[in-house]
Amino acid sequence: MGRLLPQLDLGNWQQHFHRAAGADPGRQPHHDLCAWRTRQPLGLAERAWRDAEQFRKTQRNWAIAGLVVWVVGIGGCAASVGSVPYILKGSDAYHMTMDAIRADTRVKAAIGDDMTDNFWVGGSLNVNANGAGDAQFGIPVHGAKGKGTVFSHLVRNAGTWSIRLLVVRVDGVDAPIVLTNEDHVPIPNAAIGI
C-alpha cells in the first residue's frame, strides 16, 4: 500500500532542542534559555548573540525602527490629505471663483462683506498639458450675516478658465443665488429664466 514512515522519538525532544542550541544537556531545560540564540532564514549559518543584553538591545532597536516607520507612514498620509486644500486653493480656477463671489452684491447681502472660505474645500481640479482643464468646487463660506456653500464648475480652453456654473446656497434660504449657469443646468428652487 504505502511505505511505513519511521517512528520519531519525541520523548527527548527538549534535550535534543537544547543540545542543538548549545545548552548543557545535563541542565534542566528552560524555555528562555535559547531565546537569544536563533537560526537565520533560508538555511544560513547559525547566529549566536554575544549575550542576552545584545539580544535585548537588538530587539529594542528593531522596535524603535518599527515605531519610526509607523510614525513616518501616518505622518505622510496626514500630510498628503492636508495638502489637498492648499493645492485646490492655489489654482487660478479657485481664485476666479472666489473673486466672482466676493464681487456679487447678492452674496454680500446674504453672507456679508467679510466673507471668507473654510480650510476644507471639496472638489476636483484637472489640468492637461495641452492647456485644457476642468475644475469643480464645493466651497464652504461664512461671514458676519450668515454662511453657505459655493458650487462652481469651470472649464479651461487654451490656458484660459471660464466659469460655466456658479451657485451659492445660503444656509436657511431655499432659493440659491445663481451667478452663472452657461450650460443651463437645472437648479432646484432657482429663479425661472436664469
Image: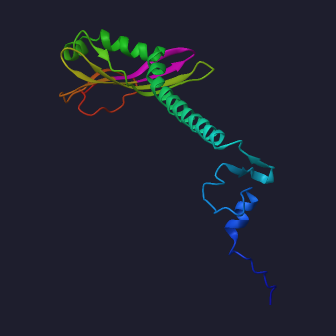
Q: Residue 9 or 143: which is nearer the viewer?
A: 9
Residue drawn at 36 percent across, 14 percent down: 98
**Nearer to me, 38 or 117:** 38
> Looking at the image, what colour scheme do you see?
rainbow
| Residue drawn where x is 57% and y is 38% of the image | 63
The location of residue 91, given as percent across then percent down, is 48, 16
The magenta-colored residue range is 153-166
Residue 44 on image: x %, y %:
80, 50
Q: Is residue 21 left or right of residue 94?
A: right
Residue 19, picture quadrant: bottom right
- The residue depicted at 46 percent of the width and 21 percent of the height is 88
Chief secondary structure of the magenta portion? strand
Q: Is residue 159 magenta?
A: yes
Is 118 located above or below residue 42 in the figure? above
Which quarter of the rendering shows the N terminus? bottom right
Q: Quadrant of residue 168?
A: top left
Q: Is residue 25 magenta?
A: no
- The image quadrant where one finds the C terminus is top left
Q: Position of residue 49 (x, y in %)?
A: 71, 44
Give the side of residue 49 with respect to residue 150, left or right: right
Q: Is 87 or 1 nearer to us in this picture?
A: 1
